[in-house]
Image (cartoon, rainbow, N blue to C red):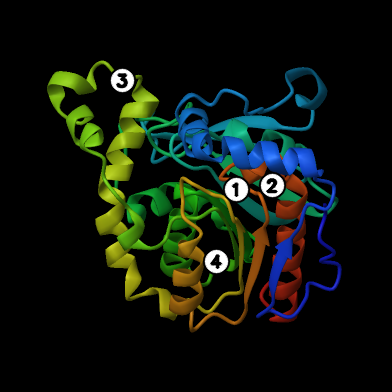
């Protein structure tokens, strides 16, 4: 069900998107399978099975792959997907961990007129080089900065998913004059919610790390460092002055919905904070509820324009 955000509701509103089409039988089945749902989410997050990216035939002409070399060094490059005219308003989509730009393919391909949508492979993933992980949020924000900066002087909207939400927050703090609004989807934020499993520590040891595929090893390195990185971010979050729209599934077992409460408390300096909570939504909202992300982006753009944040 698509929530009506045409008027972009009052900024303090908590909008819960219900699922009125669920039958009594489906509700019973969901209840019976509930104990297995966290395991399913973890399995999908690690393997990516069941998550669709770009439809190679249907969307290849709409989404373009670009690799830019930085500082003339062929070993240091940023690979990213784009859709829409470069003259449009920039909307940058930042993937989670593990992940890649291709996850945003269908959403990029849906770019409305007047938007220039970009999605990078973050350092350590996809075709971006070097292939080693960058475990600091500042380093991640610096890597995607060339996509955020509009050479004409306009401001960008940054959409961050999961770990990418923390990168978006860091980017907005590091580039306050370049970003006009944030959309945080299933975003990690609260350092006290970052629990390290003993197997993660074991997998980081040289004796075992070689057995992991590079993207999983890089993801593990990022997540091991995420708690301290979020702790360092904590005191600066009230400095944010941009509008923030938060989209989160109420049944997210990978990034707890308590992160929403933390963000709402810490983002005390933001112009607007809008919450969109998805009933029965899990961690994979970009695949299961792309229409809600589209609605959130539209509202973020309206908020930015209302604040006079995209004047050139």
* Rendered location of residue 275, percent (x, y): 63, 69
Q: Which residue is mark 3?
A: 212
Q: Which residue is mark 4?
A: 178
Residue 131 seen in render:
no
Residue 263 seen in render:
yes
Going 52% across and 72% down the picture, which residue do you hit? Answer: 177
User: Which of disc 2 and disc 1 is earlier in sequence?
Assistant: 1
- Tag 3 secondary structure: loop
User: Which of disc 4 and disc 1 is earlier in sequence?
Assistant: 1
User: Which of disc 4 and disc 2 is earlier in sequence?
Assistant: 2
User: Which of disc 3 and disc 4 is earlier in sequence?
Assistant: 4
User: Which of disc 2 and disc 3 is earlier in sequence?
Assistant: 2
Q: Are marks 3 and 2 in contact (CB under 8 Å)?
A: no
**Residue 17 or residue 102, whichever sits in front:** 17
Mark pair 1, 4: CA separation: 15 Å
Q: Which quadrant holds the C terminus?
A: bottom right
Mark pair 3, 1: CA separation: 27 Å
Q: Which residue is mark 2?
A: 117
Going 45% across and 39% down the picture, which residue do you hit? Answer: 122
Q: Which residue is mark 1?
A: 93
Going 41% across and 66% down the picture, which residue do you hit? Answer: 174
């Amino acid at each position: 069900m698509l929530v009506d955000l045409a008027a972009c509701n009052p900024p303090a509103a908590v909008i819960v998107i219900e699922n009125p089409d669920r039958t009594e039988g489906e509700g019973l089945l969901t209840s019976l399978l509930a104990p297995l749902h966290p395991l399913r989410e973890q399995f999908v997050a690690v393997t990516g099975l069941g998550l669709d990216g770009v439809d190679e035939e249907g969307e290849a002409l709409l989404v373009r792959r670009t690799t830019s070399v930085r500082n003339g060094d062929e070993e240091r490059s940023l690979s990213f997907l784009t859709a829409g005219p470069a003259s449009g308003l920039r909307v940058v989509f930042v993937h989670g961990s593990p992940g890649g730009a291709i996850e945003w393919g269908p959403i990029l391909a849906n770019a409305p007129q007047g938007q220039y949508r970009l999605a990078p492979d973050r350092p350590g993933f996809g075709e971006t080089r070097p292939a080693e992980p960058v475990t600091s949020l500042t380093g991640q924000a610096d890597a995607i900065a060339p996509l955020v900066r509009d050479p004409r002087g306009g401001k960008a909207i940054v959409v961050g998913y999961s770990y990418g939400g923390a990168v978006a927050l860091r980017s907005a703090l590091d580039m306050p004059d370049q970003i006009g609004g944030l959309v945080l989807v299933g975003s990690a934020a609260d350092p006290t919610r970052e629990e390290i499993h003993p197997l993660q520590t074991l997998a980081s040891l040289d004796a075992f790390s070689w057995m992991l595929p590079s993207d999983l090893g890089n993801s593990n390195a990022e997540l091991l460092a995420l708690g301290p990185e979020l702790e360092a971010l904590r005191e600066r979050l009230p400095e944010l002055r941009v509008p923030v729209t938060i989209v989160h599934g109420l049944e997210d077992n990978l990034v707890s919905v308590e992160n929403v409460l933390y963000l709402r408390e810490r983002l005390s300096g933001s112009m607007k904070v809008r919450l969109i909570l998805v009933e029965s939504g899990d961690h994979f909202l970009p695949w299961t509820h792309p229409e809600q992300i589209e609605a959130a982006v539209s509202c973020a753009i309206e908020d930015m324009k209302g604040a006079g944040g995209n004047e050139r």
